[in-house]
Image (cartoon, helix red, strand yellow):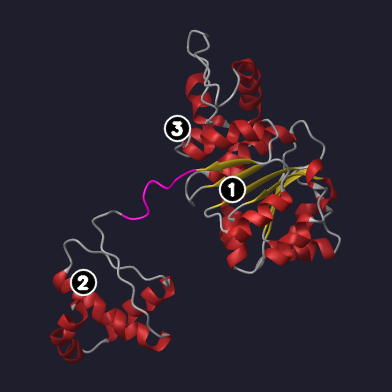
Amino acid sequence: MNSIGKFGLLGVLLVITGNGTLPQADPGILPASATIAIVASLETLLNLEAVDKLGFTDPTPIQQKSIPLGLEGNDLIAIAQTGTGKTLAFGIPMLQRLAGLRGKGLVLVPTRELALQVEEAITDVGKAPGVRTAVLIGGASIVVQQRALAKKPRIIVATPGRLIDHVERKHVDLRDVEILVLDEADRMLDMGFIPDVRTIVYSTPPKNKRQTMFFSATLTPEVERLAVQWTQNPVHIEIEPDRVAAESVNQLVYIVTAEEKDGIFIQIQFCHLIHYASNRTIHSGDHGGIGRSRIVMRQIPIAVIWRIIPFTHVFLQ
């Protein structure tokens, strides 16, 4: 991949063409005068072959808008759905800016799985010397994490509870955090992590002494209030989802108790198989419930199945 593909891939949208000429800059993205320097520094800091192997061929909308602003050191309040490329939207500016800073970057996420994904993505694309990372999550050895912290990582990806454990044990000092990212902020609010997050945020330097990038899938009043409190003169970015659901999909909601769920789900599945197999899909908000229902389905005697089938019309009505 040449410089055109590499640079366009990273979302800055100003590319150096094969003959060395600079195309017309998009004034809403980045001034042309800054382009060449940023190209050189990004190619030095990022493992662009690894980025290519990850399958990134074009910047996503959130990357297009967030990367240039993040590179300039702006605070961000970015609203975009999960799975839209947010990790590189904040990971690339963090890698770039940390090269010129003495402090470290901190990424707070709500779940262990997301923490591992974020750390992996940053590690895959980052190749700057000395940019070590550490993942601090529950369910993993705190001793191993302590050893990782002793190596002075430049980027820490953590869930709130485990990070507080390390802070209280004095394994990590947050006073040198210069770039703070809160990813999936709405989920952290829903999961009750905000008191822990607040403790962590106020353990970092004041907001005028750090860059804060705030990412969320939704912007509820509570999320917005926290974002305004923890950022300084933030730039607001909002990416509309392409579509929540196809117009041709009929969505039904059944309000049932936990005890009723397996039985109702089994009968709905029969409705689906008999009457809707060609153009309907049924989902459950509880993935564990789906798994249990499949197990129950395999255990139903054939005599019981034949008793259920005649009543499927009731649910269709």
Counting residues from the start of the chain, the first of labels 3 and 2 encountered is 3
Please provide percent x and percent y for residue 6: 51, 26
- Amino acid carrying label 1: it is Glu
Question: Which numbered disc, 2 or 1, marks the residue that appears first in the sequence?
Answer: 1
Residue type marked 3: Asp
In the rendered image, residue 240 lying in the magenta stretch gets the answer yes
Q: Is residue 192 left or right of residue 18?
A: right
Position above or below: 220 against 178: below
The correct choice, above or below, for 168 with respect to 126 in the image is below
Residue for badge 3: 58
Name the side, left or right, on which 39 lies relative to 172.
left
- Mark 3 and mark 1 lie on one chain; the one further toward the N terminus is 3
Measuring 17% from the left and 68% from the top, which residue is drawn there? 276
Which residue: 66% across, 30% down?
Answer: 45
Quadrant for the C terminus in the image: bottom left
Query: Does 182 appear above or below 291?
Result: above
**Which residue, given by chain and number where applicable, does mark 2 sit on?**
272
- Quadrant location of residue 92? top right
Per the rendered image, the range of residues in magenta is 239-245
Q: Position of residue 154 (x, y in %)?
A: 75, 43
Q: Is residue 314 above or below residue 173?
A: below
* Secondary structure of residue under mark 3: loop
Q: Amino acid at mark 2?
A: His
Q: Is residue 50 visible?
A: no
Give coordinates of residue 298: x percent, y percent: 27, 81
- Quickly name the residue at label 1: 120
Classify 10 Å Cα crowding around label 2: few (below 14), some (14-19), many (20 and above): some
Q: Nearer the viewer, mark 2 or mark 1?
A: 2
Residue 170 is situated, as x and y percent measured from the top left of the image, at: 86, 60
Magenta part, dominant SS: loop
Give SS at disc 1: helix
